[in-house]
Image (cartoon, coloured by chain):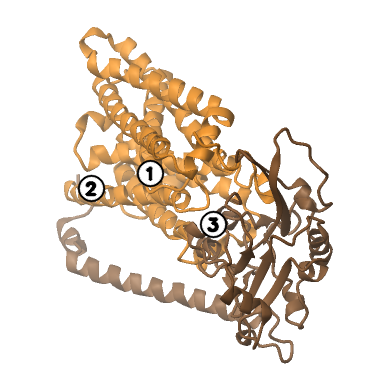
Chain colours: A orange, B brown
């Protein structure tokens, strides 16, 4: 076996890690946004009616995280006051420049869809409340007080269109982040055509896991019954997305190890030394293997489980997956710089 | 129950055609408004001189279109004294622990085991190093920004702050850079860094303020053995260009096809 050429040497400027926690957080948050939106689209577009209890929750969760998604970026920038340069005069050869357009379009889309979904409730609340509350809901109602069947039918059609458009929008919102990493040929750990897809599928994993955790927590806190079919369906989708995500991550590493070219000389030692705990330990064994087993039990052994047991297992698996996706972002961003 | 009476509802029904037509009109207005803002912003920027490349064209007689610079490093001549690093630091106020240029030392044993290091970028030269192996080959490799023709750093800049000047240099508009560090990640050679005081991207500029006045970069000036040389492909009988055109030269990481404009004589296979 030939001795490796140079190991462990970093260029002098490379000892400084430029993309730190903020840049780990941003893909994590946009991942939650995209994933939560996919859950609501599974109901609105693909007609998965067992997901009705979480359809609205997913949309609101998606918007909530979207509104804070830019904060880590602004904190990270050397000159946040110039950040509008990206939106007003972007340099279009850069994947990062896609941010302005994609974020704005997606924000408008989600806000509009939420307005339409909640429109009837807004109007009812506007009529029934008094004082500041009435003023608030009357403003949000935007002067439209039509709750007729026809109007609601138009609402529904528009929601379906928006939810359908929102799926590629959500994919691009997170896909461009993956492409940003995948297109940097200077970095062996990042540079792969699979990167946007890995990011996207792990994003959807985190979003679905988030909805599971939120749904169960909210139902328990408000002393309501957890819908068994809903949890079962979410578990099934989550299991599918985790398996695909982990398969692709492992495929990438396996290919690099098999081809034994220069990338592996760098990445092999990286994974076995500096990233040993966070990648093999946290991301793979704890974060992937255990949830796959747990969710497999939920999906395949349904008749043997009582409701509370199933809910607990699914909840645990989702919590672990939320940690796993964070670990994945950490390992990619920080790992690529050490 | 219906809020309004039937005739009013009928009148308010918006046909699909009218909806699409009005949406298209709104969209046109949005585009017009948006592009006016962008154009106005650029005009204001032009008036302020922010968009001028390099900012040196106001100097009389220097025309960047009449030059196309290249750099030549002779690895066989470098003695690892670090004068170039110190000169660059002083000339360009380079902050400590960051480097616009640096020198790497390679020590290779008979079995092919390689040790590479660059203590503090070789600012203070190199201390002798004792190794366990029998070192049969050792050399110093000066490095700096390669001012590539097919550069990834310009391609990846989200605001266009990094650009290629007409005389072949990659420069950074310090007023436009937002400090996102994408270009730092994009550079395969580790030439860039974010300046800790200005919070913008910074790197070797071939001492643009000197070369536009007919001087050579500080590192070239400081090198006592002529390992670093500077040339201009648009100059007649340029020595450096002769060497590049006639002798066997290398570039760093040719497989990435960045087309660097820093050429190396005597580069060995172990250099990353």
**Alpha carbon separation for disc pair 2 and 3:** 50 Å
Residue located beneath label 1 in the image: A126
For disc 3, the chain is B
Chain under label 1? A
- The residue depicted at 57 percent of the width and 76 percent of the height is B245
Q: Are marks 2 and 3 in contact (CB under 8 Å)?
A: no
- Do the residues indicated by labels 1 and 3 lie within the same chain of the protein? no
Where disc 1 sits, the SS reads: helix
- Position of A119 with respect to A268 (left or right) is left
Tag 2 secondary structure: helix
Label 2 marks a residue whose chain is A
> Which corner quadrant of the image does residue B93 belong to?
bottom right
Q: Which residue is located at x 23 percent, y 7 percent? A: A304
Residues packed near mark 3 inside 10 Å, few (<14), some (14 to 19) or many (20 plus) = some
Distance between mark 1 and mark 2 Cα atoms: 25 Å
Residue of label 2? A160
Is residue B78 toward the left or the right of residue A25 in the image? right
Q: Looking at the image, how many numbered discs can be counted on the residues?
A: 3
């Amino acid at each position: 076996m030939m001795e490796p050429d140079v190991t462990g040497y970093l260029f002098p400027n490379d000892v400084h890690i430029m993309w730190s926690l903020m840049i780990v957080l941003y893909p994590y948050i946009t991942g939650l946004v995209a994933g939560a939106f996919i859950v609501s689209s599974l109901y609105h577009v693909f007609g998965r009616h067992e997901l009705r209890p979480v359809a609205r929750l997913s949309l609101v969760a998606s918007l909530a995280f979207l509104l804070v998604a830019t904060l880590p970026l602004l904190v990270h920038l050397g000159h946040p006051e110039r950040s509008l340069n990206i939106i007003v005069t972007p340099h279009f050869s850069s994947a990062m420049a896609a941010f302005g357009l994609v974020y704005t379009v997606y924000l408008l889309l989600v806000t509009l869809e939420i307005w339409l979904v909640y429109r009837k409730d807004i109007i009812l609340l506007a009529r029934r409340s008094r004082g500041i509350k009435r003023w608030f809901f009357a403003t949000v109602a935007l002067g439209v007080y039509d709750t007729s069947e026809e109007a609601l039918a138009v609402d529904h059609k528009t929601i379906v269109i928006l939810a359908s458009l929102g799926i590629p929008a959500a994919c691009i919102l997170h896909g461009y982040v993956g492409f940003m990493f995948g297109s940097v040929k200077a970095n062996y750990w990042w540079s792969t055509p699979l990167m946007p897809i890995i990011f996207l599928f792990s994003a959807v994993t985190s979003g679905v896991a988030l909805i599971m955790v939120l749904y169960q927590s909210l139902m328990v806190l408000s002393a309501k019954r957890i819908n068994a079919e809903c949890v079962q369906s979410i578990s099934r989708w989550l299991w599918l997305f985790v398996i695909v995500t982990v398969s692709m991550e492992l495929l990438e590493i396996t290919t690099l190890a098999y081809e034994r070219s220069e990338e592996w000389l760098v990445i092999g030692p990286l994974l076995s030394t500096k990233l040993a705990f966070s990648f093999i330990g946290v991301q793979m064994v704890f974060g992937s293997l255990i949830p796959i087993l747990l969710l497999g039990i939920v999906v395949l052994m349904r008749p043997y489980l009582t409701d509370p047991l199933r809910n607990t297992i699914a909840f645990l698996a989702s919590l672990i997956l939320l940690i796993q996706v964070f670990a994945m972002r950490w390992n990619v961003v920080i790992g690529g710089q050490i | 129950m219906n809020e309004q009476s039937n005739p009013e509802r009928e009148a308010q029904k918006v046909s699909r055609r009218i909806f699409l037509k009005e949406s298209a009109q709104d969209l046109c207005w949005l585009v017009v408004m948006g592009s006016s803002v962008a154009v106005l912003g650029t005009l204001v920027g032009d008036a302020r001189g922010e968009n001028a490349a390099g900012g040196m064209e106001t100097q009389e007689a220097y025309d960047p279109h009449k030059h196309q610079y290249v750099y030549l490093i002779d690895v066989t001549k470098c003695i690892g004294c670090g004068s170039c690093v110190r000169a660059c630091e002083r000339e360009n106020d380079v902050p400590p622990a960051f480097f616009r240029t640096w020198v790497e030392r390679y020590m290779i044993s008979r079995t092919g085991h390689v040790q590479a290091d660059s203590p503090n970028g070789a600012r203070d030269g190199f201390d002798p190093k004792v190794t366990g192996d029998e070192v049969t080959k050792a050399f110093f490799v000066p490095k700096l920004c390669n001012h590539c023709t097919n550069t990834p750093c310009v391609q990846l800049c989200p605001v266009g702050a990094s650009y290629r000047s007409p005389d072949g240099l990659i420069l950074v508009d310090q007023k436009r850079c937002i400090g996102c560090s994408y270009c730092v990640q994009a550079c395969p050679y580790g030439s860039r860094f974010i300046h800790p005081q200005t919070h913008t991207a910074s790197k070797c500029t071939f001492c643009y303020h000197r070369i536009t006045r007919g001087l050579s970069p500080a590192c070239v000036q400081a090198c006592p053995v002529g390992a670093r040389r500077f040339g201009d492909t648009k100059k007649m009988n340029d020595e450096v260009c002769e060497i590049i055109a006639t002798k066997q030269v290398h570039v760093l990481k040719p497989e990435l096809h960045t087309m660097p404009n820093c050429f190396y004589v005597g580069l060995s296979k172990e250099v990353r």
